Amino acid sequence: MPLRLIFMGTPDFSVPTLLELVAHGHEIVAVYTRAPKPGGRRGLQLQPTPVEEAARKLGVPMLTPKTLKTEEALQEFRAFDADAAVVVAYGMILPQAILDAPKLGCYNLHASLLPRWRGAAPINRAIMAGDAESGVMVMKMDVGLDTGDVAMAERLPITDTMTAVDLHDRLSRLGADLMVRAMAALDRGGLQLKKQSEDGVTYAAKIDKAEARIDWSKPAHEVLRHIHGLSPFPGAWAELENARVKILRCELAKGSGAPGEVLDEQLTIACGEGAIRILELQREGKARMQAVEFLRGVPVKPPMRLA
């Protein structure tokens, strides 16, 4: 029997899970997402969230409450008479009364191997910290910050070629499949829950734009992971000829020199130890481009430096 589900999510990371639940026959009785925000070229047009756009195409009831802490919001939530709620990057705290409303509970898809990287930016932080792997987990939610009991998990290696958007896209698809399997197990009464370990807890704080400036004095591998962990947003940056340049993709390279020194005409840059070669970048106010394309218009060669 299909489950009656409330789906709660906001960004594009959430959409594959919503679509897979529908494809596997579950009844989505309501979709909760964040309210549209101003955007567009002039910043004046309200931009619906990716989940709102998906919900409208599916023709399911869609809500954008500013809070879930009122009695009115609780009664509205309860009225859907859901078996369970599925939460994927919703971006709003669920109070205990909401968590208790569905018959079988609320289940969150989190993009890390809990208890490592609880919090807002687990994908970015895993790459920036040099982690060898990441993954997705389904947990039954409680009022803590990603502290609920874990039901199922899938792991994924992090390679030095992966940027945050690469890992985001792979985990989004992996997570959709995992949540479908979790809901199938929940439906048949076979979903096993396990308490999270108290060892190895780390917190993935929201990315601050002040973190984005590249520190060339660090070893090349740390510089690479910093760049990839912030690509494409907010984008790690350096200054070239007094102009800010975002570096979006790079690779480890041979060479040494003063930190930030340009070592050749292929955008090889010295770090505190070793070097990286820039593969993709973006000047202020310009589109992102491959390094070879950039070099046609902006010759970069020794003894130039990236500040």
Image: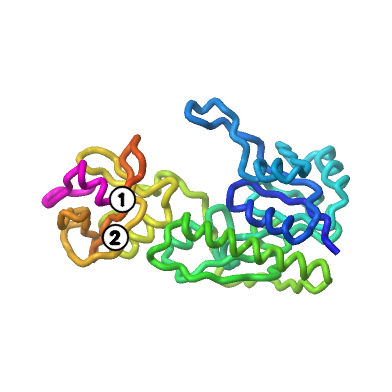
Secondary element under disc 1, as helix, strand or loop, is strand
Structural crowding at the residue carrying mark 1, measured as other residues with C-alpha within 10 Å and reported as few (<14), some (14–19) or many (≥20): some
Looking at the picture, which amino acid does disc 2 mark? Answer: Lys
Relative horizontal placement of residue 143, taking residue 136 as reference (left or right): right
Determine which residue is flagged by label 2.
218
Question: In the rendered view, would you say 191 is above or below 36?
Answer: below
Looking at the picture, which amino acid does disc 1 mark? Answer: Gln
Q: Residue placed at 14% from the left, 50% from the top?
A: 301
Is residue 299 in the magenta section?
yes
Considering the image in quadrants, where does the N terminus appear? bottom right
Q: Position of residue 234 (x, y in %)?
A: 43, 45
In which quadrant of the rendered view does residue 73 lie? Answer: top right
Q: Residue placed at 18% from the left, 65% from the top?
A: 255
Earlier along the polypeptide chain: callout 1 or callout 2?
2
Cα–Cα span, label 1 and label 2: 24 Å
- The front one of 227 and 49 is 49
Is residue 297 in the magenta section?
yes
Q: Residue placed at 17% from the left, 64% from the top?
A: 256
In which quadrant of the rendered view does residue 244 lie? Answer: top left
Q: Position of residue 214 (x, y in %)?
A: 32, 51
Determine which residue is flagged by label 1.
290
Q: Residue placed at 41% from the left, 52% from the top?
A: 231
Viewer-nearest of labels 1 and 2? 1
Question: Magenta stretch?
Answer: 290-307
Secondary element under disc 2, as helix, strand or loop, is loop
